[in-house]
Image (cartoon, rainbow, N blue to C red):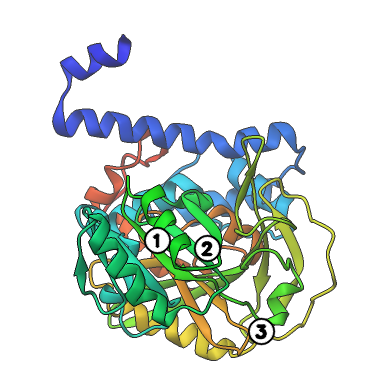
């Protein structure tokens, strides 16, 4: 009732800003809730002064130090450059064209939008009530057309095999992803009819490299690579590996409504770090992988950076890559709405690393600051741009 009254009083731009700021405040409380469940060591007065001084140059003030306390407790790293999640959210509004996201975030079209990377082999696309084969020939969904379609695509499928079906959009956290074992053509037809209430892409299952199977053999474990366009360059910010639970086929799963995901950080030389962490900040038991080299790591990062060059409207991208059994980097998807922050700062430290100063520079722009509630803004801050 209260929300409806507010909606009637303030509309359009002002209502959206109201909702945005409510979301900011709610997001900011995440660290406070974490600390309530995981007692954290207090920060020294010297470090608090350092945090205040660093963020004041961008016109930002924090009512408390809960985000830095959380990151210190989870990582053991003391650094004033850790970026609270809602602050990164305001920056995403600046770096990524919000009105373009829905059009570009369609898994059926990834291989068309970004043609210079390796994608999983597609079996079929279902879009807007029509089927398309790997060459983008169009088929309708009446029985005779589906039969013809299945007959054609079955010529490139080796039975029996496993396939992955993904909704074309809204598949965050592994939702909307299904795995099927198919024995013959009729199985493909049944799967199409079972899922024709929404757009989807059907792909061959990826056999991951043995190095990644060390972490979990049942899921396809995924590297989150964050790239950042700065001027004429595409920069690599960080790489982390997400791995799932034994018996699950996705790297992120929900158990009794709780999100379960584990990450391990990656050094610049392509070796794994010795810290493994989850959203709870706990370190799962696993094999020692400290110093283990990732196959073709340079090629992996190069491919992500080259792919970013074709995402013209988006300056911060979170790429999900795996490496197949032959050592080839395979792009699973790109993330342009919310590339993610918390897990990847847990794994590698401050989000933008050595590029943090440049990354935060847009906070000096009034339009960017308008996405941040006044409580977190230094009012007499002078825009130096």
Res. 341 in view: yes
Residue 270, picture quadrant = bottom right
* Badge 2 vs badge 1, beta-carbon distance below 8 Å: no
Q: Nearer the viewer, residue 349 or 189?
A: 189
Q: Position of residue 114 (x, y in %)?
A: 31, 77
Secondary element type, mark 1? helix
Sequence-wise first label, 2 or 3: 3
**Circle on res. 351:** 2
Q: Position of residue 266 (x, y in %)?
A: 65, 75
Residues at marks 2 and 1, CA–CA distance in whole angstroms? 11 Å
Residues at marks 2 and 3, CA–CA distance in whole angstroms? 21 Å
Relative to residue 151, is residue 380 depicted above or below? above
Sequence-wise first label, 2 or 1: 2
Residue 229, picture quadrant = bottom left
Please give the residue where the numbered disc 1 appears in the rendered image. 360
Kindly report which numbered mark, 2 or 1, lies closer to the viewer in this rendering.
2
């Amino acid at each position: 009732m209260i929300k409806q009254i507010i909606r009637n009083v303030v509309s359009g731009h002002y209502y959206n800003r109201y909702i945005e700021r409510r979301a900011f405040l709610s997001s900011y409380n995440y660290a406070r809730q974490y600390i309530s469940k995981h007692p954290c060591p207090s920060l020294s007065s010297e470090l608090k002064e350092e945090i205040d001084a660093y963020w004041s140059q961008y016109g930002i003030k924090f009512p408390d130090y809960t985000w830095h306390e959380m990151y210190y407790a989870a990582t053991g790293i003391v650094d004033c450059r850790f970026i609270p999640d809602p602050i990164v959210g305001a920056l995403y509004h600046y770096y990524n064209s919000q009105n373009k996201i829905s059009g570009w975030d369609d898994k059926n079209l990834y291989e068309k939008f970004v043609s210079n990377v390796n994608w999983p082999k597609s079996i079929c696309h279902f879009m807007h009530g029509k089927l398309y084969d790997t060459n983008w020939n169009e088929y309708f969904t009446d029985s005779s057309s589906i039969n013809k379609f299945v007959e054609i695509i079955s010529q490139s499928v080796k039975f029996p095999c496993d396939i992955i079906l993904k909704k074309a959009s809204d598949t965050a956290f592994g939702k909307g992803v299904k795995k099927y074992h198919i024995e013959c053509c009729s199985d493909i037809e049944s799967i199409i009819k079972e899922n024709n209430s929404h757009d989807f892409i059907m792909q061959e299952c990826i056999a991951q490299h043995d190095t990644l199977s060390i972490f979990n053999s049942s899921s396809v474990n995924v590297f989150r690579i964050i790239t950042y366009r700065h001027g004429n360059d595409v920069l690599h910010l960080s790489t982390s590996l997400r791995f799932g639970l034994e018996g699950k086929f996705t790297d992120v799963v929900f158990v009794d409504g709780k999100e379960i995901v584990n990450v391990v950080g990656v050094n610049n030389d392509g070796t794994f770090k010795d810290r493994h962490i989850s959203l709870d900040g706990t370190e799962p038991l696993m094999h020692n992988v400290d110093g283990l080299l990732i196959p073709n790591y340079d090629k992996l990062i190069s491919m992500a950076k080259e792919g970013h060059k074709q995402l013209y409207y988006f300056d911060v991208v979170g790429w999900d890559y795996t490496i197949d059994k032959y050592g080839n980097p395979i792009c699973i998807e790109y993330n342009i709405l919310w590339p993610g922050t918390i897990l990847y700062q847990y794994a590698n430290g401050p989000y933008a690393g050595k590029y943090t100063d440049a990354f935060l520079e847009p906070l000096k722009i009034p339009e960017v600051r308008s996405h941040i509630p006044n409580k977190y803004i230094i009012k007499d801050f002078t825009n130096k741009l």
